[in-house]
Image: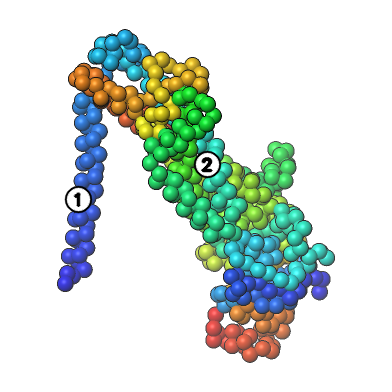
Amino acid sequence: MNPKIHIQNLSLSIDRQPILKNVNLTIPKNKITVILGSSGCGKTTLLKSLNRLTDLIPGVQRSGEIILDGVNILNGGQDLVDIRQKMGLLAQRPYPLPMSIYNNITFGLRISGRHNRQFLDKRVEHYLKMVNLWEEVKDRLKDPASALSIGQQQRLCLARGLAVDPEIILADEPTSALDPISSRMIEEKFLELKNQYTIVLVTHILRQARRMADYVVLMYLGEVIEQGTPDELFNNPQHPVTKSYLSGQFY
Amino acid sequence: MMNTKNEERLFRVLMFFSTVFIVGVLLLIVGSVLYKGVPSLSFAMLTSIPKGGFYFGEDGGILNAIIGSLYLSFGATFLAFIIGWPIALYMNVYLVKYHTLVNAIRFVFDVLWGVPSIVYGAFGFILMVFLGVRASLLAGIITVSLFIVPIMVRAIDESLKSIPHGLLESSLSLGSTRSEISYRIFSREAFQGIITAILLSFGRAIGDAASVLFTTGYTDRIPTSLLEPSATLPLSIFFQLSSPIAAVQDRAYASATVLIVMVLVISLLSRLIGNRRF
């Protein structure tokens, strides 16, 4: 296994309430790592620790290390913009930027200083094709992104995230607001994208985890209970919590 | 005990009548001003400054007050906007982690919003005496802008506050800095709210008499520099209404009509701009 991110002894509390308890985890490169667990178990917090969105939470305290390409990104001196540009985020529901479809894709490029019109045009077409949205929107690129359906918006948000050329995709229950067809499109896209990107997918849908995962992490009450390949975890669970989770005793 | 259906009916009737009552009162105010004001409104009144004997019912107009009020209100609204807009953005984009602090700031602005405008006028007066400035357009603009900054900040703040946290997270994840998020994303998302805030502040600025009484002064001329005193419509109404001469009193209502129409035009214009969609 070729590791991309090492999480070592990561603990996080909000107003002294522990949310993550001593998490140790290795995320493999160019694979889909699925973080599975019931709601409130800390899986979203773990995901957002990776690109330090947890910095925004009032009363947050954190210890431990997250090592990305040999560098501890929890160190004070790190350039946050740089870290975040390495990780595209796909949230539970799409948050399109208040601008046109075209500018949603180019925003990330323009703020990093690329303004060449032909370059931007090519990128827009490339990434919209990548998420199967090009045919649907090519004649209305100037329309506001908010005019798209939720499923289309989510694909646009994926394209927007990919356009800034990240190495990692963080996905926080990305299909939970979508209809089955849009959900399947996102899932299929992820399976294609994993050859080029390291994907961390948070979900509480067991079947989705079975369909997608190369590596599975089960969380419960802020702790990593068990981790391993899908075969190990789904077919031969070791921990009693994993067993009861898989048998549907809690979600 | 009332059953739910009757309770529902009772409250619907109550709400209906209170709405009708308030709209009725509003129409009565506007109606009576127009009724008294429109007959004494004339083209000359809108296009000329007071001539000798104007305050005794003779020729002249209120152009000095119209222009003065526009100068004052645009100046003060502009100043309040360039101060208030960044404050609201700072609270909602930079201070997200510090809830208690942001709530304290909100509380301060709410208190300032509630302070009567005459207090701002008195404060402006102290400031003028301290700086050795006479009653002037500049002193008025500064005083009125202090008085409308809380309105500007809280109104923009309310619309920024309603932006979902997810948009902030998504924007940060794209590698945007906080200032890019402030000016290029949040301000755009809250565009209509910002227009409303400007309108609200402008309305307060143009309609207030107490804060300009000591600070802006009054003159029959149209000011040609920021350091000259200036007439304003609310004071023009006040002075004309204080007159014992009926014809002059009627002109106060004509001035009020002009004020109402100006506020209406500004409202409609900002609605028009605000309806642009992204």
Identified by mark 1, the residue type is Phe
The foreground one among A178 and B200 is: B200
Identified by mark 2, the residue type is Gly
Q: Residue B213's x, y, as percent?
A: 38, 29
Label 2–label 1 contact, CB within 8 A:
no
Q: Residue at x 69, y 52 (%)?
A: B175
Side (left or right) of B6 relative to B193 = left
Q: Does label 1 lie on the same chain as label 2? A: yes
Task: Indicate the secondary structure of the residue bearing disc 1.
Answer: helix
Q: Nearer the viewer, mark 2 or mark 1?
A: 2
Q: Residue at x 47, y 34 (%)?
A: B126
Q: Residue B147's x, y, as percent?
A: 45, 38
Please determine whether, in this image, residue B191 is positioned above or below residue A48: above
Side (left or right) of B232 relative to A97 = left
Q: Residue at x 52, y 26 (%)?
A: B132
Q: Residue A147's x, y, as percent?
A: 50, 49
Identify the colour scheme used. Answer: rainbow
Task: Indicate the secondary structure of the residue bearing disc 2.
Answer: helix
Q: Does the image show residue B122?
A: yes
Q: Which residue is mark 1?
A: B17
Q: Does the image show residue A185?
A: no
Side (left or right) of B181 relative to A74 = left
How packed mark 2 is, by other alpha carbons closer than 10 Å (few <14, some 14-19, many 20 or more), is many
Task: Examine the image and state in which quarter residue A33 appears.
Answer: bottom right
Please determine whether, in this image, residue A85 is positioned above or below residue B139: below
Report in which chain the residue with disc 2 lies: B
Q: Residue A159's x, y, as percent?
A: 65, 54
How packed mark 1 is, by other alpha carbons closer than 10 Å (few <14, some 14-19, many 20 or more), is few
Q: Which residue is mark 2?
A: B84
Lower position in the chain sequence, tag 2 or tag 1: 1
